[in-house]
Amino acid sequence: MGIIMERILSEEERYIAAKKKVENIKGFYGNLVSYILVNAILIFINLYTSPQYLWFFWPLLWWGVGVIFHGLKVFEVFPGMGKEWEERKIQEFMEKEKENKNKWK
């Protein structure tokens, strides 16, 4: 019975992890669509009101940098900072906390 429960929990954990990944991807695409729509509106406003000074480049640039980093994180382009790294860091901090509590007893 214990092995069966472990397998069920493992399936449930994988489902939760997959669901979270899908939500992250969905969030990225929402950010990307917002970036495109808002910047298209800003370009139109800029070119219509003051075409001699092109200020729309600034939000386009800096928000674009944010979108790029968001995509890199969501699609795990840099594997060194992925889930495994997070788990190692969590374990490391938990061990340090445990050592600090035991130090003063």
Image: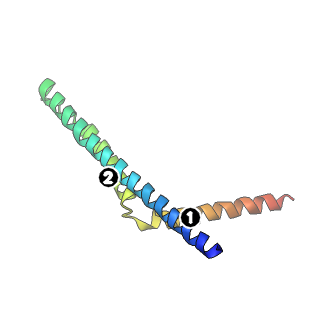
Residue 97, located in which quarter of the rendered image? bottom right
Residue 20 at x, y percent in the picture: 45, 55
Q: CA distance from mark 1 to mark 2?
A: 24 Å
Q: Is residue 59 left or right of residue 88?
A: left
Q: Residue 80, image x and y in percent?
A: 45, 67
Q: Residue 55 appears at what percent x and percent y?
A: 22, 33
Q: Amino acid at mark 1?
A: Glu
Q: Does residue 72 lie above or below 46 as drawn?
A: below
Q: Does residue 18 appear anywhere in the picture?
A: yes
Please report whichever mark, 1 or 2, sits nearer to the chain's N-terminal start. 2
- Count residues near mark 2 (Cα–Cα under 10 Å), then give few for <14, some for 14-19, many for 20+: some
Residue type at mark 2 is Ile
- Which residue occupies 69% across, 64% down? 95
Front residue of this view, candidates 7 and 23: 7
What residue lies at 40% left-to-right and 52% top-to-bottom? Answer: 23
Depth check: give the residue in front, 68 or 87. 87
* Position of 3 relative to 73 (above/below): below
Q: Check disc 2 and report the residue beneath it.
A: 68
The colour mode here is rainbow
User: What residue would you read off at disc 1?
Assistant: 87
